[in-house]
Amino acid sequence: MAVDKIKEKRELDKKIVGEFAAKLVKDGMVIGLGTGSTTAYAIKKIGGRIRREKISVLGIATSHQAEMMALSSGIPLTTLEEHPVVDLTIDGADQVDPNLHLIKGGGGAHTKEKIVALASKRFVVVVDERKVVKVLSRAVPLEILPFARAFVEKQIARLGGSAHLRMAKAEKAGPIISDNGNFIVDADFGEIRDAKKLDLDLNQIEGIIAHGVFTIKNEVYIGKNGKVVQLKK
């Protein structure tokens, strides 16, 4: 299959599963809006439903990117302070394993994503089939206090990982800064056989504000060959 055809198929699968998730939104809901290319299709579709069906929903954005897309799509926004319980959150993932454990944070928005997911009655994850793996292996994004960088890197080494500060691609641009004003560090642990243990271990390290291992209850839907499939344990 030609490269262009592969990309076209992948994009179609993202669109199909993202728009599927948008159909789960009901009138009167408060919805969490995740970050990423697949979730973007859901956000646009929700905006379209607001215009066509006149449904009333409020969105809570997990990043500046999601906020801008929601506003351009016509989704009114609110905050967790005003609505601490979220009916439904739609988000993507960088990797999903057979236990429905996730690695998130490729875009550095995992802190807000995790908070909103934990505040949600229902957490729906949408991915294309490339994101489904037998074993999690992607480097785990960490949002850390800049002050604690050296300390955190040392603690990651004690856990058997190697941590690297995420840098902007432009020459001499410096470290990437999160929406919250902190550093993003990527911690590589190789194959992650016990995601729950790593989740707990990372939670114990002072200086880490949030990490990208998600072991919370979720529903995972996959865009595959033009169809939507639910991944189950």
Image: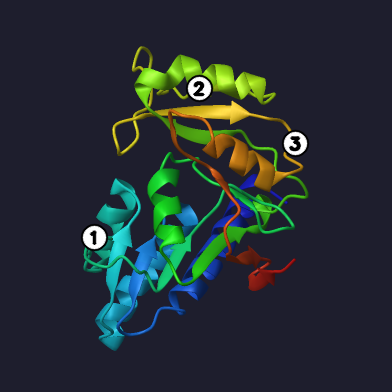
**Residue 15 percent location from the top left of the image:** 51, 65
Q: Residue at x 74, y 57 (%)?
A: 98
Q: Which mark is residue 152?
A: 2
First of labels 3, 2 by sequence position: 2
**Residue 119 percent location from the top left of the image:** 41, 63
Horizontal side of 132 relative to 18 (left or right) equals right
Q: Residue at x 21, y 65 (%)?
A: 82
First of labels 2, 1 by sequence position: 1
* Alpha carbon separation for disc pair 2 and 1: 30 Å
First of labels 3, 1 by sequence position: 1
Q: Secondary structure at mark 3?
A: loop
Q: Residue at x 27, y 68 (%)?
A: 83
Indicate the amino acid at tag 2: Val
Q: Badge 1: how crowded within 10 Å, few (<14), some, or many (20+)?
A: few
Q: Secondary structure at mark 2?
A: helix
For this rendering, which residue is in front, 81 or 100? Answer: 81
Q: Which residue is mark 3?
A: 191
Q: Quadrant of residue 59?
A: bottom left
Indicate the amino acid at tag 3: Glu
Taking the image as drawn, is residue 35 in sight?
no
Nearer mark to the viewer, of 3 and 2: 2
* Alpha carbon separation for disc pair 3 and 2: 20 Å
Q: Residue furthest top?
A: 172
Q: Which residue is mark 1?
A: 81
Indicate the amino acid at tag 1: Glu
